[in-house]
Image: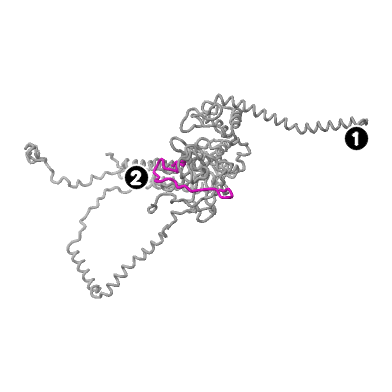
Amino acid sequence: MSTQEIPEENLPAGQDTAHGAVKVADNPFADPGLPPHKPRVQDIDERAAKRSERAVAFMFVLSMLATVGFIASYVIFPVDKNVYIWPFGHVSALNFSLGWTLGLALFFIGAGAVHWARTLMSDVEVADERHPMAATPEVKAQVMADFAQGAAESGMGRRKLIRNTLFGALALVPLSGVVLLRDLGPLPEKKLRTTLWAKGKLLINMNTHEPLRPEDVAVGSLTFVMPEGLSEHDENFQTEIAKAALMIVRIQPEDIKDKRELEWSHEGIVAFSKICTHVGCPISLYEQQTHHVLCPCHQSTFDLSDGARVIFGPAGHALPQLRIGVNDKGFLEAHGDFDEPVGPAFWERG
Amino acid sequence: MKKLSARRRHPLAAVVVLLLALAATGGLYAAFAPAGTAKADVTAQSLAIEEGKKLYSVGCASCHGTGGQGTTDGPSLVGVGSASVDFQVGTGRMPAQQPGAQVPKKKVIYTQAEIDQLAAYVASLGAGPITPKEAQYDPAGADAAKGGELFRTNCAQCHNFTGKGGALTYGKYAPPLDGVSPKHLYEAMQTGPQNMPSFPDSTMPEQQKKDIIAYVEAVNGDKTVSPGGLTLGGLGPVSEGLFAWIFGLGALIAVAIWVAAHTAKAKKS
């Protein structure tokens, strides 16, 4: 924009400084200083001060009584006694009295201290002045001279062997800390990609702990199974079931839209991982008419009649399906492990 | 035989024949008498089916079809069994007021006798789960702790850990289990009403259902005691956290403001 287009009088330089001048104080940022001190009633009236003293002492005594009440409640009330107290409903007498007495004991210590500080302790305003932080030139020169003298006396520059070995020692010391980081491992290796499921493993009903037969699984029913050989008493049970947890539902084969799902099922009995592919919540809110499975954590919804495709929510991929069949004794068995890692995605999942 | 035929005019022959005839009659009667009572049972049963069919034509046929074959408004009732009818009608869910995501529980409009007749009719359409006897669902003596484990494995994902219910997709929900009778709890597990999956005896035996009923009665029954009081709906950390953040922190902030707003100076400015 060129200045020629703007009328002369509208330009800042064109304004008449004599008319628009504002009177500025000598220093607009001058320290206004502290307001005058105002006394409290307790500062003027000794009787009011006495009253405050008694009030504070009264609160501390109440706190003492509450503590005595706490100990008394602990002794008096049996652990299983329940009473009705409005508006709390039926509560354990012990819990209720312990909570209130301890709460009041702490509250009155605090309330007394606050009242004491507000009414009786000194309330004179105090200002702490700031000072420049830099040292004076004399001090600086002295420090530099001391340092130079120390360096010369230590012989750091002259005795190179000592200097170099010291540097070596200092450089190696942090390695101890680095080595300890090994305890963060070991790396998961293949553990995120494999589960306990393997070819020929029977599907064990988690209610009855019996192997499942296809005729046990009714259309519209929901069953949770774990791999044969795993027991709730095993030390690694939680680690293993967190990957191997499986839900079994039966869908009329003609309702299954996904071709591979039907192929991997046994007469409509399908087995899907129970671990949500978003962040790994156990997911089994199954609606038998819509065949939807809902995750309670973030509402990811999967359609079990269509390869457990994600139809809503933040989950990134479908629930992995386990290929199942029937062995020669008539029990349901796995045809191998999942063909993809179960649960949430991870960096190297691919 | 000659001897026997030679004695046919013996004075005692008539007595022997009479005795044999009496024995035969008695034996035949003994053989056929139970059939008579069975016939009476069958008649009572068919009478119930007849009555049930009449009730069905009035209350159910408009959605489920005249023969229970189902229409676009309601599913087929062939093979759902008497337990389904006892649950759906006994909790007031059926007859449904209006179509929707889920048919809610409401006032029961049929008597138990009428429900039994309806159940008999629907059961006659095709074999399905039978209304349980009291010995099957009575939770007395069942193991509530074991029931708790089973409940957390099979039910808690939708119905909450203490049976307070929860939300599902697109307006559907798992109803709270407060005040649901043991019989209806049993039937719901057996039949899987609406969108609930079923838990048949083959995967969850009768004793385990009893254990679950005992657990639900223990944690969500009339006599359930909550030692903490103020359950806030029993929904867990969500409602409790909300209460602590709003009322707990709110009270602390209010006290802090009150302390700061009231000056201790003698002359108020």
Q: Is residue A334 visible?
A: yes
- Placement of the N terminus of chain A among the 4 image quadrants: top left
Q: Nearer the viewer, residue A346 or B151?
A: A346
Q: Residue at x 57, y 41 (%)?
A: B200
Determine the image quadrant of residue A312.
top left
Q: Give the residue at mark 2.
A: A49
Tell me how the rendering is colored. one colour
Query: x, y percentage for residue A53?
Result: 37, 46
Is residue A32 shown left or right of residue A105? left
Q: Residues within 10 Å of mark 1 (few under 14, many from 20)?
A: few
Q: Residues within 10 Å of mark 2 (few under 14, many from 20)?
A: some
Tell me if residue A342 comes above or below residue B239 in the rendering.
below
The subunit letter for the residue under badge 1 reads B
Instruction: Write the start and end of the magenta stretch as one range.
Output: A302-331
Going by the numbered disc 1, the residue's amino acid type is Leu
The subunit letter for the residue under badge 2 reads A
Query: x, y percentage for residue A311?
Result: 41, 40
Mark 2 to mark 1 CA distance (whole Å) = 137 Å
Q: Are marks 2 and 1 on the same chain?
A: no
Q: Give the residue at mark 1.
A: B4
Q: Residue at x 36, y 40 (%)?
A: B254
Q: Is residue A92 visible?
A: no
Query: x, y percentage for residue B98?
Result: 48, 28
State yes or no: residue A314 in magenta: yes
